[in-house]
Image (cartoon, helix red, strand yellow):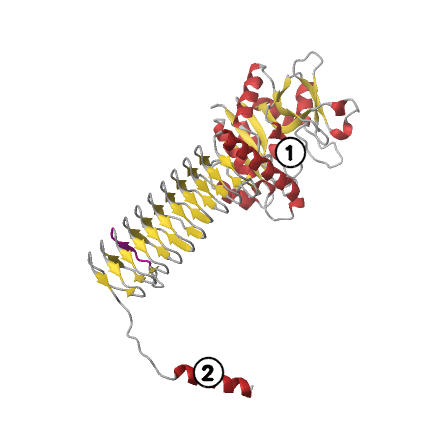
Amino acid sequence: MSNNCAVILAGGQGKRMKSELPKPMFEVLGEPMLEWVIKSCEEAEITDLCIVKGYNAEVIENYIGGRYHTVMQEERKGTGHAVMTAAEWLGERRDGNVLILCGDAPFVDADTIKQSLELHIRNESAVTVITSEVNDPKGYGRILRSADGKGISGIVEENDATDEQKKIREINSGAYWFRTEQLLYALEHIKPNNSQGEYYLTDSVFILLDAGFHADAYISPNPDVVLGANDRKGLLRLNDAARKAIIEKQLDNGVEFLCTDGVSIGRNVKIGVGTKILQGTIIKGNTEIGENCVIGPNCLIENCTVGSGTKLNYVQAYDSVIDSSVKIGPFVQIRPGCHIRSGVKIGDFVEIKNSEIGENTSVSHLTYIGDSDVGSGVNFGCGVATANYDGENKFRTVVGDDAFIGCNTNLVAPVKVGSCAYTGAGSTITKDVPDGALAIERGKTEIIEGYGARKLKDRTEKNHRS
């Protein structure tokens, strides 16, 4: 693949999306369509990429972040014109082959890229069109196969097709392999001879055929290779197609779904055999979940590692590690930087941030643990909070093994509670607690007789006057 490259067309505006976002940056299952296309190229071992940007180009530029070369299409005058903007870049690679892809057609896959290239090289073609056979080809350009069965004789658009040609089910996906030298030749001869005054890349096929070169087409076994989105409805269809395809794959891998309503799983997610995914669950990013878990209902898990036998119920977890046999929820947030060790139980309405929770520790409801290192076998009563921020700096709290933190305890960091130590309910702990000690830190109770009655009388008189 070393002498092969790819140009991805990502300059489209997508007016019907009604957004300032470039169309290829709209997301399918949490990833921009452009990223889907880039990853397919990378999986096919094509890493020499040029991204053609155009509308709101800084969005594309910021997203690419220097990973790949970009060129600017100042005016959007068709697909052929978009490729022309990369002519100088292509000129430095004229001894190889180039793949042309649309940045808003996310379902082109690595196998299709590889196998179409093999056909392209084997048949010594100047151009190989990636095609698909569909039941309803309406609206797509039809592929005209040569009478001798060797290659193609052209592409006819829907409006120009005869009744007989409209019956053809093989359609153009908009993706092509070219010998780079021949593509550069074709780009020099494309003319804007159409009502739109645009340069169409499809014209390059006719130009190369007229020049005596061989043209062919590879029928992808992936029927979704042609799918794109021109509006929000189309984008929804892409998300539905991707979501269903991934769930089907997970089912084949032994994952159980009791109901798929509201379930969305990213394409990089790995889930172990026997795990149950319940309704309303969203799993994103590079998440890996072990075997025999129960995830859901209504969980959001992003970039996490979850061990086997863990149960998450109404949990949001981000960029964290949750070990095996953990039970969390409902209504719990695990913020980035956490490591929840095996056997931990976390009750409802708990938030944990940038903390390690040791094995078999129990965290009761209505508790906040932030920037803390908690040992094993610890028990947190309800309403505990670590006060980790003084307005300028954040400090850590340390809790030793087998400690017992009483209800409504405030641990004001930096502070350490020793192993087997206790804190009295309602305490605000500002000093380190030695191992095995009991700490009670409460303000002195002062009772002012009659205060409430006087306040009530004052309010009553004020309301009467008003």
Viewer-proximal residue among 397 and 86: 397
- The residue range painted magenta reads 394-401
Provide residue 348's location: percent of width, then percent of height.
42, 54
**At 27% across and 61% down in the image, what residue appears?**
423
Q: Secondary structure at mark 2?
A: helix
The residue pinned by badge 1 equals 79
Query: Magenta stretch: dominant SS?
Result: loop
How many marks the image carries: the answer is: 2
The residue pinned by badge 2 equals 456
Counting other residues with Cα less than 10 Å from the Cα at mark 2, is it few (<14), some (14-19), or many (20 or more)?
A: few
Q: Nearer the viewer, mark 1 or mark 2?
A: 2
Image marks 1 and 2: residues in contact by CB distance under 8 Å: no
Label 1 to label 2: alpha-carbon separation: 77 Å
**Quarter of the C terminus within the rendering:** bottom right
Counting other residues with Cα less than 10 Å from the Cα at mark 1, is it few (<14), some (14-19), or many (20 or more)?
A: some
Residue 297 visible in the picture: yes
Label 1 is placed on what type of residue? Thr
Q: Is residue 393 left or right of residue 172?
A: left
When asked about the image quadrant of residue 90, the answer is top right
Magenta span contains residue 404 = no
Q: Is residue 129 left or right of residue 343?
A: right
In the image, residue 74 sits, relative to residue 346, either above or below, namely above
When asked about the image quadrant of residue 178, the answer is top right
Q: Tell me which label, 1 or 2, sits earlier in the chain.
A: 1
**At 53% across and 38% down in the image, what residue appears?**
258
